[in-house]
Structure formats: structure tokens, C-alpha cells
Image (spheres, rainbow, N blue to C red):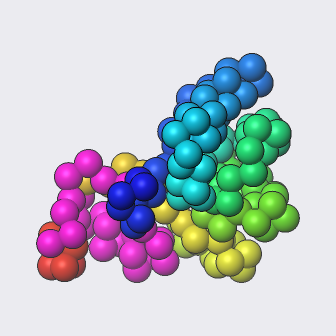
Amino acid sequence: MSEHEDVWIITDSKQSAESLVKLEFSDIVDAARELGLEPVLERIAVQIYNKEMYEKICNVYEFPCFIFTLYEYRNGNIESFPDICRFCIYNDIKFITMWDYLATSEVMEIAKQYGIKVYVHTVNNKELVEKLGKLGVTGFYTDYITPEELKEI
């Protein structure tokens, strides 16, 4: 990251216990400081699963970029989506990521009202990428689709 200033990392922590979250993110911050590379911490987008996780991480280090992921909302029950958007706006979180089936026109309209950018995970189908783009999804996580293939859409 110190040699390639356009490289960003998105964390994918599966920890939620306070002690584990603190340990995991303290290790990241300590390693960067020990190597004299603290500026790279500005290019780490921290993915959080809930409001409590945000607070735990901010107690370790105030990363400038967070992504609120709806990874745990597998059942499609996201009645609390407007509340999540309000939390994000209040805490200057500009990005939410979700499963493709959660990215409905209603959800996208709410995100748009709050100025939240929506990313979808994990999309490996070009037709679905096109459909999501028409709904207003900003981007997507993929295992296989290349930038060259996106130009064909």
C-alpha cells in the first residue's frame, strides 16, 4: 500500500465480541505504526455489521472510511433500513453493502434519499450487474467479472 497509493483494503472481519474486535483492529493499527506506515490506515475501509461494532472500532482508531454491511440480513427482513441509513449519515458512513435480493427499488430509493451509495456482494453474473446498475447500485463485489467484461454491458 505504501508503494501503490491507489490501493485500498476493505476489511471483512467476522468478529463481534468486543475483545476480539479490539484485538483485531489494534493489531492492524499497531503494525502500521511499527512500520512507520500509519498513512496507509487512511485507505482502509472498515466494514461493520452493526452499530455496536462501529463504536468498538472507533475506540481503537478513527478510520476515515466505514462501510455498513447488511451481510447478516440474509432473511430479507430489513424494515430497519431507514434507521441504518440515519445511523450512517449521523456517523458520516457513506456506503452500505448488501445481498443482491435486498437491492429493491424501494431500498434503493431510501438509500438515494439519504445520499448513501449501495454496493452489492457477491455478483458473478453480468446480467445481474446490468439489472443492479439500472436500479442505481453504485458497484458490486465479484469473484470473476473483469473490467473488460463490464465494458460490454
The residue at 66%/67% (across/down) is: 94
Q: In this view, does 119 lie to the left or right of 48?
A: left
Visible residue check, residue 8: yes
In depth, the one of 58 and 69 nearer the eye is 58
Image mark count: 0
Task: Point out the stretch of residues depicted in magenta.
Answer: 125-148
Quadrant where the C terminus lies? bottom left
Examine the rendered structure and indicate whether residue 124 appears above or below residue 28.
below
Measured as percent of width and height from the top left, residue 119 is found at 49, 62
Examine the rendered structure and indicate whether residue 77 appears above or below residue 85.
above
Measured as percent of width and height from the top left, residue 96 is found at 60, 59
Residue 108 appears in which quarter of the rendering?
A: bottom right
Q: Does the magenta stretch include residue 128?
A: yes
Examine the rendered structure and indicate whether residue 153 appears above or below residue 120.
below
Q: In this view, does 44 lie to the left or right of 91?
A: left
The residue at 31%/53% (across/down) is: 142
Residue 88 appears in which quarter of the rendering?
A: bottom right
